[in-house]
Amino acid sequence: MRPDGQDDDMTVDPQRALVVGVDYGTLSGRAVVVRVHDGAELGSGVHAYPHAVMDSQLTAGPAAEAGEPVALAPEWALQVPADYVDVLKTAVPAALAAAQAEHGIDVNDVIGIGTDFTACTMVPTTADGTPLCELPEFADRPHAYVKLWKHHAAQSHADRINALAHERGEAWINRYGGLISSEWEFAKGLQLLEEDREVYDAMDHWVEAADWIVWQLGGRYVRNACTAGYKGIYQDGEYPSTDFLAALNPEFAGFVADKVEHEIGQLGAPAGRLTAEAAAWTGLPKGIAVAVGNVDAHVTAPAANAVEPGQMVAIMGTSTCHVMNGDELHQVPGMCGVVDGGIVEGLWGYEAGQSGVGDIFGWFVDNGVPPAYVTAAAERGLSVHQYLTELAAEQQIGEHGLIALDWHSGNRSVLVDHELSGIVVGQTLATKPEDTYRALLEATAFGTRTIVEAFTSSGVPVTELVVAGGLLKNALLMQIYADVTRLPLSTIASDQGPALGSAIHAAVAAGAYPDVRTAAKSMGKRTVAAYTPIEENSQRYDALFAEYSTLHDYFGRGANEVMHRLKAIRREARADRLGADA
Ligand SMILES: Nc1ncnc2c1ncn2[C@@H]1O[C@H](COP(=O)(O)OP(=O)(O)O)[C@@H](O)[C@H]1O
Ligand SMILES: O=C(CO)[C@@H](O)[C@@H](O)COP(=O)(O)O
């Protein structure tokens, strides 16, 4: 029910109707107010999560407050669910206020809200959705917190799931390119069971954060078809069997039935109506449509109006996700997954990804640049990224004499192995920071080409690369991607791609459009072929890509397991230093 007592969302004049999209990223949540008939963005707000990512210690809970924070082991990455609610209380009202100030909008014209989230990001909850970390008895227990998508500490659990799936000939493993990731629901769930049985037993639901936030907004728990299909191994109406789970660990047999299985909602459908409490948090009208949850990458395809087969959308930020629709079902080695209706209804949605992209450039800026560069950048009014990019752009292709592997956050596609690590080959005493920075930019482009080639050679041809996300602003990087992939590179015409995509889903959930594909045509936008490949550059990159592929297979396909051994040595050494509890 609308506050004015009306039931029908579209009683609002269609020319005036508005929706709100909220994008939950790795470090912050962003809200945008969008006009339904043309996708115009009228106001936005952002809120950084106060606890950001907890990857070395718990910065929440009584122990942290007492100045003795609980230490976390390597590869952990946790978040605090209350930070997500803060986004509703701050970023949404800020977006509404901006839209009111700049465009004089009337908040009663808002007919729906949609959200997207990082994934697979998991919240263990009680039956009513209370996160376990909010219970006093579990407030200092790492396993009671949200496991963020880049929590990579469940690789050994993923390895067991993969080995057993192949041993038993489980059909579903082929829908995931032959390997499921340590980032996903089952690997993280098995880690939880085996490392903190008490928390596991107290958990009634193992909830994607994408669905948890919708639960907070609309008062109903509905599992979205997107994360269920990709991260939750839900294919053709079934999860992995009880027999399979029992063979992994007899105590895990009830994982699906007891913790995971729940009503599934289709993308663009309403999951509920905005509750009085959520209306008070956000300043939005009570009773408006709340769209079924979704993933940051997948909502961005309609935001770029790029949902047709062959249009691969790369959402490039901290990490890169590649999503693309196809008419047919194919097995692509090393893809994250293929799900019927995983992006839009009626098409097979394919996903692949690179776990570290902007994160790798950020790591280098933070750890590999001498003070003189930082000062020079500041004097020019540039960020260190911009300064290094400017210097790197002056070089000929290959002039730095380097080749890098982009695995500093592991490899999601096509190797699906988070025990891999980064490397730069060719450094000399003459190597400068801009050389290494450029080699890292190029390495991520080679990673994307490896993914594109895996799709094309598996019968899912890629014809256009559509880029969205924060890295769009780096023009050198965009030209490198066009040259390396030899694809026309289109760019999304919005700074808030995922939030706009969520707003599109809100418009569909509120009944303003019949489906997401139709809504995308009116509300989504991109600049077609903003960058095109330069053949001479492409030929030079072919030589470097051949070297990348050799290193990729040597370190990534078993010829030399040094990266795995180093991570094991690191774990042992760290445990020795911190004691058995670390
Ligand atoms: N000019 C730049 N060139 C390349 N990378 C950059 C630049 N500026 C920031 N970055 C990187 O972009 C990433 C943030 O991207 P963004 O899309 O804003 O974040 P998110 O993926 O969390 O939504 C960071 O990892 C940062 O290191
Ligand atoms: O993996 C997915 C989606 O499947 C992403 O949510 C994850 O890589 C995080 O994305 P960002 O780099 O924060 O945009």
Image (cartoon, rainbow, N blue to C red):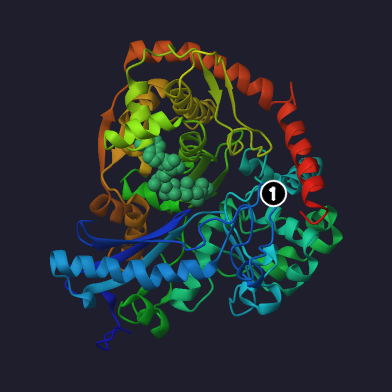
Q: Residue furthest bottom?
A: 5
* x, y percent for residue 386: 33, 33
Residue carrying label 1? 153
User: Where is residue 256 drawn, in percent x and y?
Assistant: 71, 64
Residue 309 seen from this side: no
Q: Residue at x 31, y 66 (%)?
A: 20
Counting other residues with Cα less than 10 Å from the Cα at mark 1, is it few (<14), some (14-19), or many (20 or more)? many
Q: Tell whether 82 sits left or right of 232.
A: left
Query: Is residue 164 found left or right of 500 in the rendered image?
Result: right
Instruction: Using the image, determine if residue 32 lies above or below residue 462.
Output: below
Mark 1: amino acid: Ala
Res 39 quadrant in image:
bottom left
Query: Residue 199: percent from the left, percent from the top?
Result: 73, 69
Figure label count = 1
Image point 26% across, 33% down: which residue?
380
Asked if one can make out residue 368 in the rendered structure from this viewpoint, the answer is: yes
User: Of residues 434 and 324, which is closer to you in this image?
Assistant: 434
Disc 1 is placed on an element classified as loop
Looking at the image, residue 28 lies above or below residue 331: below
- Residue in view at x 20 percent, y 56 percent: 40
Image quarter of the N terminus? bottom left
Judge left or right: residue 279 versus residue 362.
left
Could you tell me residue 179's position as x and y percent?
Answer: 67, 40
* Ligand 1 sits in quadrant: top left
Cβ of disc 1 within 8 Å of ligand 2?
A: no
Q: Quadrant of residue 197?
A: bottom right
